[in-house]
Image (cartoon, grey):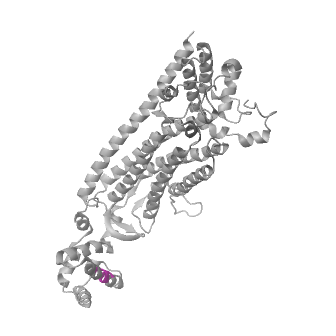
Amino acid sequence: MYRSRPKGNLDKDMLNFLSSLNDDQQILHYDILGSEAHVIMLHDIGILTLHETKKILVALEQIRHKPELLAIGDAEDIHESIESLIIQQTGVDIGGNIQIGRSRNDQVILDIRMKVRDDIIEICEKIIALITSLLKKAAENIDTIMPMYTHLRQAQIGTLSHFALSYADSLFRDMDRLYITYVRINQSPLGAGAIGGSRIKLDRQKTARLLGFKGIVRNSIDATSSRDTIIEYTMGLTIIMLTLSRMTEDFIIWSTDEFGYLDISDEYSSSSSAMPHKKNPDPLELLRAKAGTVSGNLLTMITIIKAIPSGYSRDMQEIKTSLWQASATTTQALKIMNYVVKSLIINKERMQHASSNSYAISFDLAELLAIKNGISFRTAHKVMGLLVQKAIGNNRQPLRMLREEVIREVLESLGSKLSAEEVLKDIKETSPQKSISSRQSLGSPNPMQEQNMVKLSRRRLLAYSKRIAKRKGLVDEAFKNLTIMVNNYSKKA
């Protein structure tokens, strides 16, 4: 239908190569909404008559309710397919004007922005649901003692609550990024045309309002050819998936027989085809892999965009495949992770046992020795390091099982005047629970700190929920009003 300059029909293989119809199914709904807003605006500025406006809007509504009417076989994309059907139903003298003042270039990025805008809202809602589950786990496990790790080695004693809160904080930042990206996405490019606007005095602000946008992308080149906001969005999705992937890795490790800190619900586990005793965390492993897929989606988009000159190029069509996949994958991953978190089975006894027999308490003891006895932390660090060596050398016995004479031997080897009796007393009195309770720094796993962090996070989450709901409500209200306007036009004589 668009072939005015080239002679003859497009080669069939070339049409298949050029076609984006499969990807365009994701934006069919938005393309119709955008077209309806454009047509109403054209009527209001005197380009279309009431009769023409009514005929086109009725045809668009038929497609919206019965998308199977579209004959997509000979079209390059959904825009051509819709326009072709409009012309068939209303005639070229009427339907042929649906595209006046508009190009596929501003049309497609309009559709993408509307879809991404909705996707951001949905993904933020999924993040809110996951954070809600994490905060519930955090509140329930403030006293669930467990080792904390650096280099995957026991480092300090902490709580399961502290881990859950750390995941929540990461997800809050992930949501922050999308929340800010939404502001840049929520600008309408419609009316920018192919690249340089139109001789018609289009009311771009009106179409922006009809479609729920906050404003417009003013420069017509920037409006049609920039994709930085889309890449920014996909980068945000990638970071979300990295957050989920690291959570996944923790859960996989902690659910092994060797750790046994938690168990993944049977609903979210798979069996082995050969080994009857196995219960595998396949959904979590796939989620971890899909983080790589979304990272690949981002890299694909960046690689496509990097060498395109100003103005629209057909290269940009290829971005949609990666964009839709990244959105769908991230949405699904957040949903699955929420199911997993809510159903986690916590083995508190195993965590307590690991903590009670851990050398990770050494850091707290080194600080205690330094502060209590007025020695340098480095000296206290050396004392505790040698005591751990002795304990490991004696069949990995817990520090509290060290004999006083062994401690005295270590102190004498360092020329220390510390009392072996007092050091042993400090070791025996420093339980994992006491270790955590003694932490005074802001943001530590001290129970009082954690209770406060849960409280603050819940307050923050409530504020976010209200803001996200408000944004969704504004768009829904705009679409509702647009539908009312379309219906009113359709009923006019």
**Taking 327 as reference, is 344 above or below it?**
below
Magenta region includes residue 443 = no
Q: Look at the image and give the residue range highlighted in magenta.
A: 384-388
Residue 155: x and y, percent?
Answer: 35, 70
Q: Is residue 236 left or right of residue 356?
A: right
Quarter in which the C terminus is drawn? top right
Residue 455 is at least partly visible in this image: yes
Majority secondary structure in the magenta region? helix
Report whether 291 appears left or right of 441. right
122 w.r.t. 402: above or below: above
User: Which image quarter: residue 74?
Assistant: top right
> Which one is in front, 156 or 116?
116
Q: Nearer the viewer, residue 286 or 419?
A: 419
> Visible in this render: residue 91?
no
Instruction: Name above or below for residue 448 compared with residue 226.
Output: below
Image location (x, y in percent) of residue 131: 38, 48
Relative height, residue 382 to residue 220 (above, below): below
Question: Which residue occupies 54% across, 62% down?
Answer: 276
